[in-house]
Image (cartoon, rainbow, N blue to C red):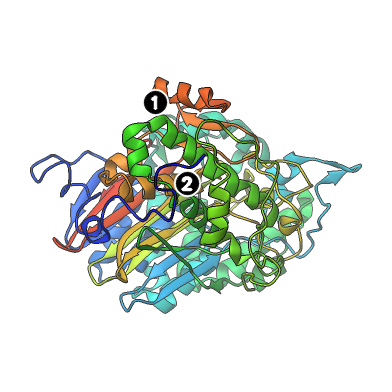
């Protein structure tokens, strides 16, 4: 069955109207005199949004010192490594998407890479996959890339020195900071496992391994020492000096394969940003090894064939069903086609609009349709890409915009903190397909394109995104939450573009997610009961969860020159301008 208008439907609101206020917070349906919610802010100078107030403040401080949006984003990232180390830090990786003031688009791949000694069968024991080996402990760790990506971004596109941005973060780590609710909950749930791997030298926990409580002051002298070493000696301290040497020694004595040579040979990669369109807007995403950019584009291409605004107004249950079906079709393709483009042939046709129209035609508006497997995009063998998480959004009045997503994968990554370093190391090896049909920590499965190989970068769901109208940036967004990152970004875009919702409401409303395998729709518990029942009546199996991921976004109104920043109200955070 096809919906009304399923024929290249191009929008419920005009591009100009949307860019000049529809979907913006204070200038739209709320009225000029309405009060902003606590998770939003406006400014005419610049905007920074992150999951922690201290990190957002670090970004604002960088702007006040003469930095631009790139400097602000890196300052936020470095500070999050101290105050939100359950999610990200120097022990992980990142994708940095930049729109410079001169209009140039930049994509910096700071994704972690498999060690040189990695093998495709390294997680098999007697022929059987052992997922715990890729999820925690020494074999779970890939070569970190975040710091190298920060350095490249600052050198080529920023104004401030890395040392100027990392020293304030070192000060926070040394003097301490009050533990927020989100991190206190993480300690309570994962602290025992963290202690079992890292031992009593872990300053994130009490000496006996018990968790700190919300409001307790956390001090990290080892992390401060690492940060100051980088400030004094540059990134060589991390990649070719004391840090790499200490990690290598620990790995040798604990059965790991990550070596100092892996650090020394790591390089960030400049990728070609993925540029597509949706209802007249230009959507700039991150290319593989991110699956986010390609599948945000693919899902939007499928949804573009439906009149979502009319559908939402007439039958919101049908609207939610179509979202779920589009997600499912894209994730089936993800499982087969996606991987590191330097090691696998990833077809560009996945973002082809004609291919999306064929997929959209498979959606039955009355019921869920089983998807047996992946589709085949046009010229799949010819047109290919060349060779737990947090999101940061930053923008300045000069026209520099940044979407940066960084991660160490799951909560506290591999649970490895090498004594004396204070850095939580990632468990990004779990993002590879460790064996055919074996799901990772997020329930995702993969194929040959994402098999383990030396130096290869694992597939990621990180989806830093920038939206342009007539070549000018009007929105930057991204999310944390494993595979739900992709669907969070899609829903934020649909809600602001198709449904003309204010940005704060678009990020706060209940979300859904379908990733093909397992064949279920995850829904946030706050989704209305009648909408849940509508999905069930259409044949969907539901999994109800409390919260699904965390998003950050900034929009800009070209008419009033006002930035609107929003952090996800699901957890503490801060959006603010200077």
Q: Quadrant of residue 245?
A: bottom right
**Front residue of 390 and 224:** 390
Regarding residue 388, the answer to whether it shows in the image is: yes
**Front residue of 347 and 543:** 347
Give the x, y percent position of residue 345: 70, 66
Residue drawn 48% across and 45% down? 487
- From what the image shows, is residue 153 above or below residue 389? below
**Front residue of 487 and 191:** 487
Regarding residue 167, the answer to whether it shows in the image is: no
**Front residue of 476 and 93:** 476
Q: Spatial distance from mark 1 to mark 2, Cα to Cα? A: 19 Å
Q: Secondary structure at mark 2?
A: strand
Q: Label 1 belongs to which residue?
A: 526
Q: Is residue 555 left or right of residue 167?
A: left
Q: Is residue 392 left or right of residue 372?
A: left
Give the x, y percent position of residue 22: 22, 51
Say which label, 1 or 2, has the lower sequence index.
2
Please tell me the numbered disc located at residue 480: 2
- From what the image shows, is residue 530 above or below residue 493? above
Give the x, y percent position of residue 208: 58, 30
Q: Secondary structure at mark 1?
A: loop
- From what the image shows, is residue 342 above or below residue 373? below
- From what the image shows, is residue 238 above or below residue 123? below
Residue drawn 71% across and 54% down? 250
Q: Quadrant of residue 17?
A: bottom left
Residue drawn 72% across and 67% down? 343
Task: Specify the farthest residue to the left.
Answer: 33
Please tell me the numbered disc located at residue 180: none
Q: Quadrant of the C terminus?
A: bottom left
């Amino acid at each position: 069955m096809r919906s009304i208008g399923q024929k290249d439907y191009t929008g419920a609101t005009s591009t100009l109207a949307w860019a000049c206020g529809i979907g913006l917070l204070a200038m739209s349906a709320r009225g000029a005199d309405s009060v902003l919610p606590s998770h939003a802010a406006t400014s005419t100078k610049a905007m920074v949004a992150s999951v922690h107030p201290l990190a957002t403040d670090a970004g604002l401080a960088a702007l006040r010192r003469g930095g631009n949006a790139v400097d602000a984003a890196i300052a936020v990232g470095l500070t999050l490594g101290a105050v939100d180390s359950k999610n990200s830090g120097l022990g992980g990786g990142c994708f940095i998407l930049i729109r410079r003031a001169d209009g140039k688009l930049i994509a910096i791949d700071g994704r972690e890479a498999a060690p040189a000694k990695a093998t495709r069968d390294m997680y098999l024991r007697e022929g059987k996959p052992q997922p715990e080996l890729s999820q925690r402990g020494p074999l779970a760790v890939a070569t970190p890339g975040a710091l190298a990506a920060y350095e490249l971004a600052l050198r080529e596109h920023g104004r401030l020195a890395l040392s100027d941005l990392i020293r304030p973060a070192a000060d926070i780590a040394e003097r301490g900071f009050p533990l927020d609710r989100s991190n206190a909950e993480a300690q309570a749930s994962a602290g025992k496992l963290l202690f079992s791997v890292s031992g009593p030298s872990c300053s994130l926990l009490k000496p006996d391994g018990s968790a700190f409580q919300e409001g307790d002051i956390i001090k990290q002298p080892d992390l401060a020492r690492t940060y100051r070493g980088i400030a004094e000696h540059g990134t060589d301290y991390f990649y070719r000096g004391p840090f790499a040497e200490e990690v290598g020694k620990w790995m040798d004595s604990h059965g790991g394969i990550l070596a100092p040579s892996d650090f020394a040979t790591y390089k960030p990669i400049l990728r070609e940003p993925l540029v597509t369109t949706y209802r007249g807007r230009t959507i700039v995403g991150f290319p593989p090894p991110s699956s986010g950019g390609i599948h945000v584009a693919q899902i939007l291409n499928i949804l573009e064939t439906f009149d979502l605004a009319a559908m939402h107004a007439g039958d919101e249950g049908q609207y939610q069903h179509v979202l779920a079906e589009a997600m499912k079709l894209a994730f089936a393709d993800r499982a087969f086609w996606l991987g590191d483009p330097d090691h696998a042939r990833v077809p560009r046709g996945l973002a082809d609009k004609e291919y999306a129209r064929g997929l959209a035609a498979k959606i039955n508006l009355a019921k869920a349709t089983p998807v047996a497997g992946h589709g085949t995009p046009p010229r799949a063998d010819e047109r290919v890409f060349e060779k737990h998480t947090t999101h940061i959004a930053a923008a300045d009045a000069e026209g520099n915009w940044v979407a940066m997503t960084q991660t160490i994968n799951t909560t506290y990554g591999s649970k490895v903190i090498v004594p004396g370093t204070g850095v939580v190391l990632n468990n990004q090896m779990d993002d590879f397909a460790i064996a055919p049909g074996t799901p990772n920590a997020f329930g995702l499965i993969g194929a040959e394109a994402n098999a383990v190989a030396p130096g290869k970068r694992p597939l990621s769901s990180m989806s830093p995104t920038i939206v342009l109208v007539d070549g000018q940036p009007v929105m930057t967004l991204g999310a944390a939450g494993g595979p739900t990152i992709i669907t969070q970004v899609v829903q934020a875009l649909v809600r602001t573009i198709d449904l003309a919702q204010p940005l704060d409401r678009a990020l706060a409303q209940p979300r859904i997610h379908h990733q093909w395998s397992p064949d279920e729709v995850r829904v946030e518990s706050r989704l209305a009961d009648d909408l849940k029942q509508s999905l069930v009546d259409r044949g969907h199996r539901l999994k109800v969860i409390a919260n699904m991921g965390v998003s950050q976004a900034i929009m800009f109104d070209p008419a009033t020159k006002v930035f609107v920043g929003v952090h996800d109200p699901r957890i503490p955070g801060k959006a603010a301008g200077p």
